[in-house]
Image (spheres, coloured by chain):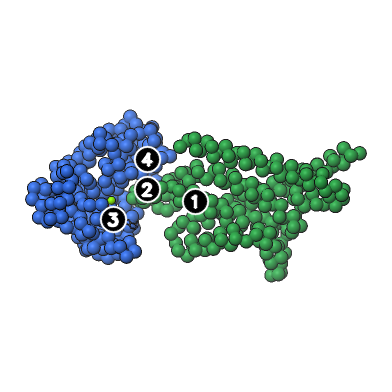
Chain colours: A green, B blue
Amino acid sequence: MADFSLWVIVSNLLLAARWTIALSLIAFVCGGVVGLLLLFARISGVRLLERFVFLYVEFFQGTPLLMQMFMLFFGVALFGVEISPWMAASLALTLWTSAFLTEIWRGCVKSVPLGQWDAADSLGFNFVDLMRYVILPQALRISVPPTVGFLVQVVKGTALASIIGFVELTRAGTMINNATFRPFLVYTIVGLIYFALCFPLSLLAKSLERRLNAAR
Amino acid sequence: MPLVSIVDVRKSFGSNEVLKGVSLPVERGDVVAIVGRSGSGKSTLLRCINGLESHDSGTITVDGLEVGGAATDMRVLRRQVGMIFQQFNLFPHLTALGNVMLAPRIVLKMGEREARDIALDMLAKVGLADKRDNYPSQLSGGQQQRVAIARALAMRPMALLCDEITSALDPELINEVLRVVETLASEGMTLMLVTHEMRFARDVGTKLVFMHQGRVHEEGPPKALFAAPQTLELQQFIGASRA
Ligand SMILES: Nc1ncnc2c1ncn2[C@@H]1O[C@H](COP(=O)(O)OP(=O)(O)O)[C@@H](O)[C@H]1O
Ligand SMILES: [Mg+2]
């Protein structure tokens, strides 16, 4: 009997983990695209754009992710717009992720020597081509380890979506615990699943970083 | 009309006035050697010519196009003026051939074949046809600088700006780069080169410009100026570089 209920617990948690993974992927892909656009704006040389992205990044880095989700979920409802927990969580995580990725990537772009910009400028490249063919290929190389490392934060960040009622891994754990009253077992398994998702990413980030340093 | 005309150009960084009214006409085929102490504004002057720095007042025109002018597309202007840097600034993620091909392909929108042919020609011209598949990190400083020259030449510029292009090189590698520059000069390329190679400035230059504290302090034919500098500052400068 006990074995059977353990299996039920595990299988239900694994099913819920799909939503954690889905949410992470959405946040990462959408956040990456938005982050790239913001990165361009941040280094465009257009004062107003740079200022806007600066404030955007400061806002999302300087306030709790949980508060951002609340603002989206409950705040948007105040304007009479229905928004599902799924939408609210995806949106909040996308915005939050984009802010952090913009800042990580800006650091990588800034670490490309100024002489590279001079060389490309003096050859007559426009901004987009200069980024595409000269700066980004070099920045990309150094950005991979910190970017993969940040993915760990995104996966863990999805747990907050449970609070606005989206059923992902953490929320499923709570619900199963409410039914089984075995908090230690349930949350241990929840923790192990998170660990199984995040640990390989951490390892990957570390090994990428080692390889990058060795390549210098 | 001079190919490059610089008239009363001023430039400050914050409260530090670096160019204090520089005027200089450069005719087609001129080889202008610019010398002067560190900090006298030589690099800034070169960088103002292709707009890497913007000047505060005065006018610079290149082949009739006004640098920073409202009607000027700076990217078009920059295609006409090549620049070579002290630190080479090759693109480290591209091979020698990749470095030379990139701007013709992307900026001039040439086809792959055409760009490749031009790039190979230019690499051959600087004596590095056999190094086309090497990455910059696999080349010596002198070779890197020659690739940088090929990269600038592939844009078919009307003039080249060279900012201390041998200063980062080991002494035994300097000559291979100077020889390339000399060949360009003999082919009639318009050159403005900031240099510490006094003998090269005297032998290859058609005009010597001595910059001092943000001004053209003395200028004239190199041989005459070296033989008989008119100002105390140039006398001292020449004396110091002989030592
Ligand atoms: N980007 C910059 N920002 C602030 N000051 C600068 C910058 N570039 C050059 N300067 C200053 O301008 C002066 C002239 O520099 P530069 O043109 O590089 O002289 P040179 O090439 O003759 O050694 C120096 O005092 C230098 O510190
Ligand atoms: Mg200089």
Q: Mark 1 and mark 2 in contact (Cβ < 8 Å)?
A: no
User: Is the C-beta of the residue carrying label 3 under 8 Å from the nearest atom of ligand 1?
Assistant: yes
Of badges 4 and 1, nearer the viewer stands 1
Q: Residues within 10 Å of mark 1 (few under 14, many from 20)?
A: some
Please name whichever residue, B133 or B114, is drawn nearer the observer in this view of the structure: B133
- Residue B117 falls in image quadrant: top left
Kind of residue at badge 3: Thr
Q: Which residue is mark 3?
A: B44
Label 2 and label 4: CA atoms lie apart by 14 Å
Rendered image: mark on residue A107:
1
- Residue that extends furthest to the bottom in the rendered view of this protein: A79
User: Which quarter of the rendering shows the N terminus of chain B?
Assistant: bottom left
Q: Nearer the viewer, mark 2 or mark 4?
A: 2
**For residue B94, which quarter of the picture?**
top left
Image disc number at residue B99: 4
The answer to whether residue B109 is visible is no
Q: Earlier in the sequence, mark 4 or mark 3?
A: 3
Q: What is the distance, in whole Å, between disc 2 and disc 1 at their CAs?
A: 17 Å
Ligand 2 has an atom within 8 Å of the beta carbon of the residue at disc 4: no
Q: Is mark 1 within 8 Å of ligand 1?
A: no
| Chain identity of mark 4 | B
Q: List x then y, in percent, for residue A14.
A: 77, 43
Q: Nearer the viewer, residue A102 or B64?
A: A102
Residue A35 versus residue A145 in the image, above or below: below
- Could you give the CA–CA distance between mark 3 and mark 1, rounded to whole angstroms? 27 Å
* Helix, strand or loop under label 3: helix
Q: Which residue is mark 2?
A: A115
Is disc 4 placed on a helix, strand or loop? helix
